[in-house]
Image: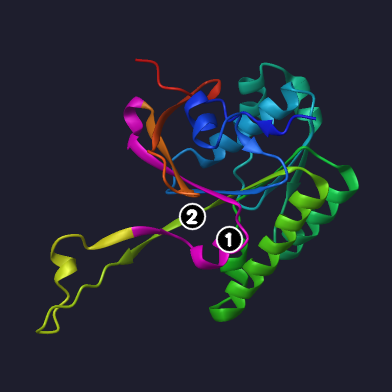
Amino acid sequence: MATTISTGSKAIDSLLGGGGIRTGMLTDVYGESGSGKSQLCFTLCANCARAGGTAIFVDTAGTFRPERIVEISGSPGALEKINFIRALNTLDQTNAIRKILDTGPQLVVVDTLTSLFSAEYSGPARHLAVMKHMHELALAAINAGCAVVVTNMVRNAPITVVDQAGRNIAQAVVPSQQREYLGSSVSIYSHIKVKLEIVDAAKSSFRALLVQSAGKEPVPFSITPRGISDIIN
């Protein structure tokens, strides 16, 4: 069985250590709306099916597009290798983990991770529920030897730098910065974290940044009818 699943972009595959998303690990992919998170998930599913593997796609926000899987893979048969689960609440989402050990897929996608938890929980209970779910997903990745990919949102968090007079001088320069939603809770059990950013949506120009483990330069990628790909100059 393959130990990696290609993202469709050689640049992103290299960023992740060669080959793509790794089995036995939980990969957290986050970014703003339109940065390519779902498109990456579709491409991973298509490539997994093309290689003869099976996948579980847990959709919490109505993002799943079967026609995109067919378009990217080039074969309607790819859908037969994807177990689609539409989670309408957090119980549906957490119960989907049982199918991982029952069916033994090569890839599990949760798109998106925190939306249902945000609606059903508040305060510390929300963080605890997300951490518990992430812990179960990480264990499933390890025990089942599959690649688990979750997507997550970002929020604009205000920056505070107070001068001697007590004024927040940061607001005058950079009013806010993007942070992963519930990032501290998600990070605890994430093996790999990747942030996707929009460079120029009109030109289908994006970039991927390896946040955990850090140390590599971000790489460019594009979104085409055949999914995630490298930018061709």
Q: Which residues are magenta?
A: 178-203
Question: Could you tell me if the residues under marks 2 and 1 are in contact, i.e. CB atoms within 8 Å?
Answer: yes
Task: Relative to 75, say whether 103 is above or below.
Answer: below
- At which x and y percent is residue 209? 42, 42
Q: Amino acid at mark 2?
A: Met
Q: Amino acid at mark 1?
A: Thr
Q: Is residue 51 magenta?
A: no
Residue positioned 48% across, 38% down in the render: 36
Q: Residue furthest front?
A: 215
Task: Relative to 224, say whether 40 is above or below.
Answer: below
- Residue under circle 2? 153
Task: Relative to 135, say whether 59 is above or below.
Answer: above
Residue positioned 52% across, 21% down in the render: 225
Front residue of 122/108: it is 108
- Residue under circle 1? 114
Q: Residue furthest right?
A: 102
- At which x and y percent is residue 133? 69, 64
Front residue of 5/83: it is 5
